[in-house]
Amino acid sequence: MNRLTRFAALLWLGLTLPLASHPAGSALRIASLVPKNSPYHQQLLELGEAWRAAQGGGAKFVVFTDGSQGGEAELARRMRIGQLQGALLSVVGLREIEPSISALQSLPLLFKSWDEVDHVREKMRPAMEKKFLDKGFVVLGWGDAGWVRFFSKTATFRPDDFKGMKFFAWGSEPEQQAIMKSLGYTPVPLETADILPAIQTGMISVVPSTPYFALASQIYETAPHMLEINWAPIVGALVVTRKAWDEMTPAAQTTLRASGEKAGAAMRVQARKEVDEAVAAMKKRGLVVNRPNAEQLREWQDLADKLYPRIRGTMVPAETFDEVFGHLKAYRAGKGS
């Protein structure tokens, strides 16, 4: 069994280990879905070593990888009850803490480049971090995990090609499922652990996924067609509970914040590099990349334009939705685009 297969097995099984509550001043338990020994894991380990040295007193730092503590909603729950003191989460988990964060990930085809993603995130960052703090969480650093692409069992180029196919949809997103149904698509609500067996058995036939995740989980072997459009970025952040933060020494807080910022920047660089690398690796193993032509791309943009009014006020709070569009409009005006 190779490394990727081992990772996939752990991720899909969603093994959960019981954790006892522990005083956060002497221990930090951080969890994520990232694979063990991946660059993301290494960044967390480096952050932990810096924190331990600053905290002193025999402080312990543990990272749980591969989804061993459950899905992202479960990680948020574990932090709330003190079993974990922190987590590296995508918007899927972060929205369990603060729903308005969905604005950075739930607006299809809105962002045309990583520069646009970075600009909007930084503009919204102070207010967003204040919202998390008010909910009992400290944001240490922001990262991302690549662009969402569509992996399917058969070739697809235009939106209508997906009608009649069965889409993976997050079980915790009933609003998204309702929107998809209203447009003639068929969502199948599942959890992350269900994706691989579901596509293998035909329960679903389309998986929205980043290339890196599709490679690591081997989704592409059963869904060997990838539509090359950047549907939406996967945005994430490293958070710790405010309780854990307040129990740290001032020196440990300063070190952890600086290390979190450094780790987030490194993760963003790594994730953006991996998009092309993962696609190249899968192409060598049989992946077919389908590139829409200009007319087909217009159809996708038309679909996105129909989705925005449905997303505003449901998946994304109206005020936050308008803020994102406002920041993006100003940025593009400044760039002359």
Image (cartoon, grey):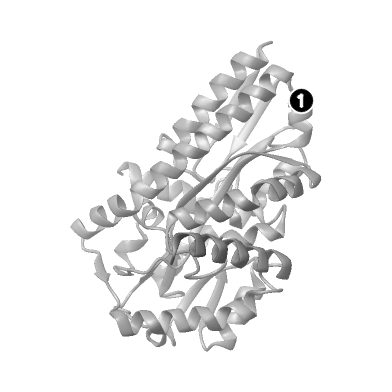
**Mark 1 is on which residue type?**
Pro
Asked which quadrant contains residue 21, the reply is top right
Which residue corresponds to mark 1? 23
Judge whether 277 appears above or below 255 on screen.
below
**Residue at image location 53% in from the left, 46% down from the top:** 67
**Near-viewer residue (59 or 135):** 135
Q: Residue at x 27, y 73 (%)?
A: 291
Residue 170 x/y as whole percent: 58, 66
User: Which residue, as the protein is rendered here, is positioned at the far top?
Assistant: 57
Mark 1 surroundings: few (<14), some (14-19) or many (≥20) residues within 10 A? some
Instruction: Give x and y (percent) for residue 287.
Output: 25, 64
Depth order, front residue of 266/188: 266
Residue at point 63%, 80% (across, down): 309
Instruction: Give the position of the N terminus as an image quadrant.
Output: top left
Taking the image as shown, residue 157 lies to the left or right of residue 96, namely left
Q: Please, what secondary structure does the residue beneath circle 1 have?
A: loop
| Quarter that holds the C terminus | bottom left
